[in-house]
Amino acid sequence: MGSIYALVAAAGRSTRMGVGVNKQLFDLAGRPVVAHALLALQVVPVDGIILVVTPGEEENFQSLLSKFMQGVHLKIIPGGASRGDSVMLGLMALPVTAELVVVHDGARPLIRPERIRETIRQARQWGAATLAVPAKDTIKVAGEQDLVRETLPRDRLWQVQTPQVFKYQLLVEAHRAAALDGFAGTDDASLVERLGYPVKLVRGDYTNIKITTPEDLELVKSLMCKHVDNINKVKA
């Protein structure tokens, strides 16, 4: 088996949280939000983790995470102007001998190690895989004046999550091509898709919430106790 590294994106501005603090560093059950994601990756395990943060916040992250990350091969680096730039900087900080890279949002603290492992397993076979859940709601496409233009078939719609796992060289190729073409995808899988490579959908959990608004944070807090119990069982 080749080496597996994780790249955790934590360089967002947290503008929709409505406060002046990076959401990745909010206290959640006694740990910063991002620490929960990092510890789940450690349990998998991975060979190392690159944490990409907002430029200028490296020391702040290092200080707040140090007591939780003992024994974890963690490197903190500054990100770029966009998420794509930040991920590319993270990729360049990884060993070129890496086989697989697990890309995860630092604001998804409820990720389960077994889901990460299954996504890794599928990425070994397909080259690229992403956690996702089937859409529960009917999705409509809006036209001008917010009038419905189209109703999409729900049975074929999935809501994409992270982690997304890729062959390292494939993801580097996809990011370089996107930068050259001026293409900004909403996730890393879209960069791989546009080159014609398959991306495997892996069934995830509806509880794998990305904290974007204050309401998300409150919901995650209510789910946290059960999640911590699950992580402890995996460690044992």
Image (cartoon, rainbow, N blue to C red):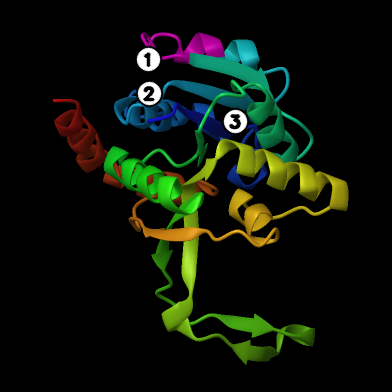
* Rendering quarter of residue 60: top right
Q: Main secondary structure of the magenta part?
A: loop
- Residue position for label 3: 22
Quarter holding residue 171: top right
- Span colored in magenta: 62-73
> Which mark, residue 42?
none
Q: Earlier in the sequence, mark 3 or mark 2?
A: 3
Residue beneath disc 2: 31
Task: Report helix, strand or loop for mark 1.
Answer: loop
- Residue shown at 42%/25% (left/top)? 35
Residue bearing mark 1: 68
Q: Which element carries disc 2, helix, strand or loop?
A: strand
What separation in Å lies between label 2 and label 1 (alpha carbons)? 8 Å
Residue 210 appearing in the image: no
Q: Is residue 38 left or right of residue 99?
A: left
What residue type is disc 2 on? Arg
Q: Secondary structure at mark 3?
A: loop
